[in-house]
Amino acid sequence: MELGPCTTKWTIDYLSQAAGSKEVKIHVSAVPQMDFLSKNFVYRTLPFDVFVRRAAEVKHEDYFLSEDEKYYLRSVGEDVRKDIADIRKQFPVLAEDVQIPEYFEKEQFFSSVFRISSAGLQLWTHYDVMDNFLIQVTGRKRVVLYSPRDVPYLYLSGTKSQVLDVDNPDFEKYPLFVKAKRYQCYLEAGDVLFIPAMWFHNVISEEFGVALNVFWKHPHSSL
């Protein structure tokens, strides 16, 4: 889709300059598969420009855990408990470069989550309670999805599946997972994926990439 100048403008140099040395809280993992249930990652804080350059590297001279550690930014509001993520507030200069697809009314808007991932990083399988667009601005992602109908086969813990490796699952531990129907797609720069509320998704960043998740409420929702 036409997303505005972001798909060509958002180079590492431009991102570093536009957001500057603003401090950001990031996930750092020594392994590519991040697991929210076992918390196999740590939270650290870096200036945004330093973080972007590190996330784009394969090997690091400066690091927290290991020279090939992975980085992940999921933007949050200024006060995590009260404020929603909104790229217009947290990264106003970058927000001007993005044209968000208008498939919902303005008053339905809930949040816009700015995401940056190292190449090879895999996020755990989970669902969200709102419809959302995953907007791939730069880089390439693989997304695997499962329908809410497959809940009995996904071994849930809260909103997350315990099956971390969806490509080589442990069928002795998770025998019913074989019944879950897998949907898969690849997102290139400029692609937008609609992820309906309650649909499970597992995401691998095949390249260093920048994305934006836009969530919206339904008119009669109490969320």
Image (cartoon, rainbow, N blue to C red):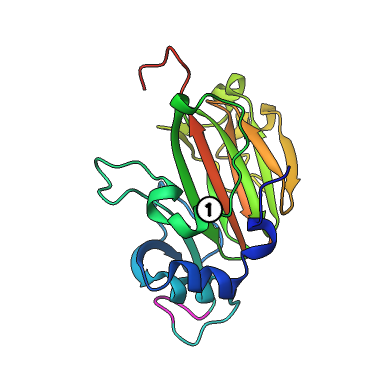
Q: Is residue 163 left or right of residue 136?
A: left
Q: Could you classify mark 1 by the number of other residues whose Cα lies within 10 Å: few (under 14), some (14-19), or many (20 or more)? A: few
Q: Dividing the image into 4 quarters, which one contains the C terminus? A: top left
Q: Say which residue label 1 marks.
A: 96
The overriding secondary structure of the stretch rendered in magenta is: loop
Q: Dividing the image into 4 quarters, which one contains the N terminus? A: top right
Task: Tell me if I can see residue 18 in this picture.
Answer: yes
Question: In front here: 3 or 178?
Answer: 3
Q: Position of residue 148 (x, y in %)?
A: 58, 22
* Residue at 74% from the left image edge and 39% from the top image edge: 184
When the figure is inspected, residue 136 is found, relative to residue 194, above or below; the finding is below
When the figure is inspected, residue 134 is found, relative to residue 156, above or below; the finding is below
- Extreme residue toward the bottom, this view: 61
Question: In front here: 132 or 16?
Answer: 16
Q: Quadrant of residue 32?
A: bottom right
Task: Tell me if I can see residue 69 in this picture.
Answer: no
Q: How many marks?
A: 1
Please give the range of residues in magenta: 63-67
Question: In front here: 154 or 78?
Answer: 78
When the figure is inspected, residue 58 is found, relative to residue 127, above or below; the finding is below
* Residue at 61% from the left image edge and 23% from the top image edge: 150
Q: Position of residue 114 (x, y in %)?
A: 49, 52
When the figure is inspected, residue 131 is found, relative to residue 42, above or below; the finding is above
* Residue at 47% from the left image edge and 51% from the top image edge: 35
| Residue 78 drawn in magenta | no
Circle 1 — which element?
loop
Q: Position of residue 154 (x, y in %)?
A: 56, 31
Q: Position of residue 164 (x, y in %)?
A: 55, 47
Q: Amino acid at mark 1?
A: Glu
* Residue at 66% from the left image edge and 50% from the top image edge: 4
Q: Is residue 57 left or right of residue 45?
A: right
